[in-house]
Image (cartoon, coloured by chain):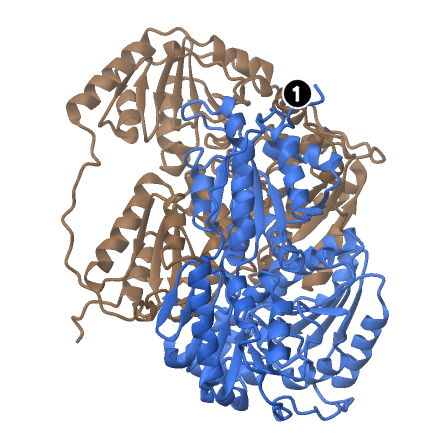
Chain colours: A blue, B brown
Amino acid sequence: MQNRPPTIGEYLLKKLESYDIDHIFGIPGDYVLRFYHLIEQSPIQHIGMTREDAAGYAADAYARTKGMGAACVTYCVGGLSMVNAVAGAYAEKSPVVVISGAPGIKERGKDALLHHKVRDFHTQQRIYEQITVATALLDEPFAAFNEIDRVLDAVYRYKRPGYIELPRDMVDIHGSLYQRPSTGGHLSDPDTLDAAVDDAIDYINHSKNPVILAGVELHRFGYQNKLIRLVEEKRIPVVATLLGKSVMPEAHPLYLGIYEGAMGREEISQFVEDSDCVLILGAFMTDVNLGIYTANLDRARSIYATSERIAIRYHTYEEVMFGDFIDGISSSKLRRRRKQDLGWAYPTPQPFEVVPDAPLTVLRLFQHLNELISDELTVIADAGDSLFGAVDLRIHQHTNFISPAYYTSMGFAVPASVGAQLGMSNTRPLVIVGDGAFQMTGTELSTTARYGLNPIILVLNNHGYGTERHLCEGGFNDIRNWNYSRIPELFGEGRGFHVRTEGEFDTAIKAALADTQHFVLIEAELDKLDTSPALARLAERMSGKI
Amino acid sequence: MQNRPPTIGEYLLKKLESYDIDHIFGIPGDYVLRFYHLIEQSPIQHIGMTREDAAGYAADAYARTKGMGAACVTYCVGGLSMVNAVAGAYAEKSPVVVISGAPGIKERGKDALLHHKVRDFHTQQRIYEQITVATALLDEPFAAFNEIDRVLDAVYRYKRPGYIELPRDMVDIHGSLYQRPSTGGHLSDPDTLDAAVDDAIDYINHSKNPVILAGVELHRFGYQNKLIRLVEEKRIPVVATLLGKSVMPEAHPLYLGIYEGAMGREEISQFVEDSDCVLILGAFMTDVNLGIYTANLDRARSIYATSERIAIRYHTYEEVMFGDFIDGISSSKLRRRRKQDLGWAYPTPQPFEVVPDAPLTVLRLFQHLNELISDELTVIADAGDSLFGAVDLRIHQHTNFISPAYYTSMGFAVPASVGAQLGMSNTRPLVIVGDGAFQMTGTELSTTARYGLNPIILVLNNHGYGTERHLCEGGFNDIRNWNYSRIPELFGEGRGFHVRTEGEFDTAIKAALADTQHFVLIEAELDKLDTSPALARLAERMSGKI
């Protein structure tokens, strides 16, 4: 008996552990209880959220900080509640494994109307096929282990979500250890790689003022050290996309700032667009990321390398892996540049002076925050002005900024803070979230309290959907005001502040930084038409399209 | 110009009005702002919820009370957040129209990475194809009106959700009034109808003790008066399924109670299963509905009629419409039965006597409630023991009981109360919801406060996922406790009670009934292992399958 292969449930848990997954986020339900029972007996800790979508956001943030995340839910009522969160992980390349319980194979009679079923037994899987790189229904013991391997391998390789459906009567069935032969195919073709690298180096060496545009894939694939090495050894200055913010330590002397076309700072846009060689590494060419198509990047002057595509000016190379390409161009053949004076890019900010009675403004609030950001904090910015305002925050360490900067789903940040703090235990999240987004998922602070986490939550209360007011105003942009700072009373834990002036904010944020025992929520009262400079520019460009 | 056809946005709103839709539930976003602007100028009122899934639940309940409902959201981040709510409406046959904004057709360049996009521009529509009866992308002005007609017609006819995607640059484009010729095909074939009706009448007339099993379709299609006429004229007793609860006024002398196999009351199961002719009208043969497959209904003794299928014993009839069939068998050829004494089915309950210091129990709580239910209240029961405990509540009027009794998605009830009260303005919702479900969507009471609604919310606090404890116990069934009764402080409106004894509950519920100015929330503290009798029976039957 001791050589018997593990059960399907056991094998799945062992594989998740092998990917360094220590926590699974989710909510139990009858079709997944048997597997939950197994989780409880395993070294993996279950983290109970209040809603399934929140479990999806937490698993996403966990994946962004730890390399892979997992959420486990019940059939349809659970899985279909997580569709948006998983879609966001797909769009922004976050490797999340979704495990869903399901009716047992033996229960699936013809047209049986079991509870939680929608149209037929494959409805949920078909939906997940639209938002994952791989799906598997574990309905066959002989194939189950290989199916698990296939999905997890795809999640790991493509940094996108995968879906595993586990019928409840298969959890305790022993699988078969027969290994499907590897199909290979994930290595660079050596000659093509050499050709691509020589081509790129030749082009860069002949350029006058190259610049690197660093994107989020460098973070997802763990290539941040490759980037730093390339930048430092060759002295090529670097900018980041919005989604890639903090992929490079922002205090680094060769880091210039965020490039986002006409939405961003003028001097950075000009520097990038004047370059005769933009080396785009791991960046998605998305609209918000690049200033709503105001970026002006000429293919004739670009090298574009991601996990999906390697292109040098007008031609592309196939069978070249992204990581090999970065290693290749970092070779001694690429010449080292002379020192440049880049002080213009990050001028030393004026020390921020609090004007105690001045009403809060978005601009001043972020300038104030910028003085207080330390290495111990991870900034998690929700969609809207929480994100746009945070663009200019200077993040010291890499991976200390998390935001749904492309998919921009409101309500991401509070549940994401749960996943981020569990995935990166030596950090404290600083969540920046608007009032509209907070109403969507703010009650997930309950989970924060349950597991002894201690985020600081800054609610920017501009009384409605502020970003939209600048695009098209109407009563539909209003929301009911909440007494946000009284949230701790609902959960019986945490601390709340309601601030209106710079002095009150200064007191509150300093108290929050000093009080590490539990979550601290600061509601910052803002004028409903106040915006960050970036949002003002964005609104100007987008309102024509509404 | 005055004869110019309306714009696509205008036409869509006019058509919604023609289906008696006065409210649209949703949250704005940049891809749908232009259409929101049109809503604001129309007679239809926009109801802003705090989350999109809540908008879906509200539209579902509105559809159940008013005949059709609508939700309007933005692309992907909005639409994909509503998938579970719409799936529930599909499963339980609720006619909900989903309108989603989308990127403009002109913006959709090859592979353009616009924000909120997941995989490609059709991802959301493909997902909705799995959970609706019809979808349309309004990308062509000439076809747009006919496409709108097609989707709304399907929603109305099949009582299931439909999906309309409206690119933002199409809202103000004028459409074409050319009418697609009707394909007909929704009428009974007269000869087949006659044959089916004669067959059924013959079978019923030869039976000794027929009984009607009434299901939710009678409500969805507005056939409740047909049912009452049939029951009263022919004196055939009637039972209802769980999902069909309140389809028949429960105080009616010919109404016996809920049939749910071995989960239900013994004497009712026996009466139905001893019948030599069970006339099943508009019922889904689902598991929870019928006591987790413990129902014992023999096809040899059944007539089964729904909008999808007409079967008499072992044979079926096609091209026979459900409503025509009911009208047909109600003819004078069906003989009237003699009066029966059915007093055994609904014994006059003992007057409930409050034991002031007795701790609350589920059984006693529902008995207590049963005394207080009046015609002015609509009971909305969430999944779990809120539903099972409510089975024996005696609902006086029809359509005064709403629950996701088949799909059983937790968190339905609070947002549903918003839709139900707006759809049926002369009623006051009595929401019965567990603590786990309340944590999912309870903050939607904010919307209640915003629009001046006044539900009574009874939170059954058994400290965790109580239904699951009886199937498989573990730490994952625990949740963090909230101070539920302090919710009014968060929203600055409403009234809260926290009760532990029968006396305290009596005081609170009477105060709630008297206080009609705003929502009143009563947190009822229960033992974590306490259950209704129905849940105890359910747990016994289901735990073997976990």
Helix, strand or loop under label 1: helix
Residue B60 point in image, percent of width and height: 46, 47
Q: To which quarter of the image does residue B11 belong?
A: bottom left
Res A289 visible: no
Horizontal relation, residue A155 to residue B200: left or right = right
Determine whether A394 is above or below A459 in the image: below
Question: In the image shown, does B37 or A392 lie closer to the viewer?
Answer: A392
Question: In the image shown, does A254 or B432 lie closer to the viewer?
Answer: A254
Residue A146 point in image, percent of width and height: 53, 35
Q: To which quarter of the image does residue B361 belong?
A: top right
Q: How many marks?
A: 1
Residue type at mark 1 is Glu
**Residue at figure coordinates x 50%, y 29% from the top left:** A114
The quadrant of the rendering that contains the N terminus of chain B is: bottom left
Q: Which residue is mark 1?
A: B540
Determine whether B429 is above or below B206 in the image: below
Question: In the image shown, does A264 or B339 lie closer to the viewer?
Answer: A264
The quadrant of the rendering that contains the C terminus of chain B is: top right
Horizontal relation, residue B9 to residue A540: left or right = left
Residue A342 point in image, percent of width and height: 62, 90
Determine whether A400 is above or below A528 in the image: above
Chain holding disc 1: B
Residue A49 point in image, percent of width and height: 68, 49
Question: In the image shown, does A172 or B426 lie closer to the viewer?
Answer: A172
Res A131 visible: yes
**Residue at figure coordinates x 81%, y 58% from the top left:** A493
- Counting other residues with Cα less than 10 Å from the Cα at mark 1, is it few (<14), some (14-19), or many (20 or more)? few
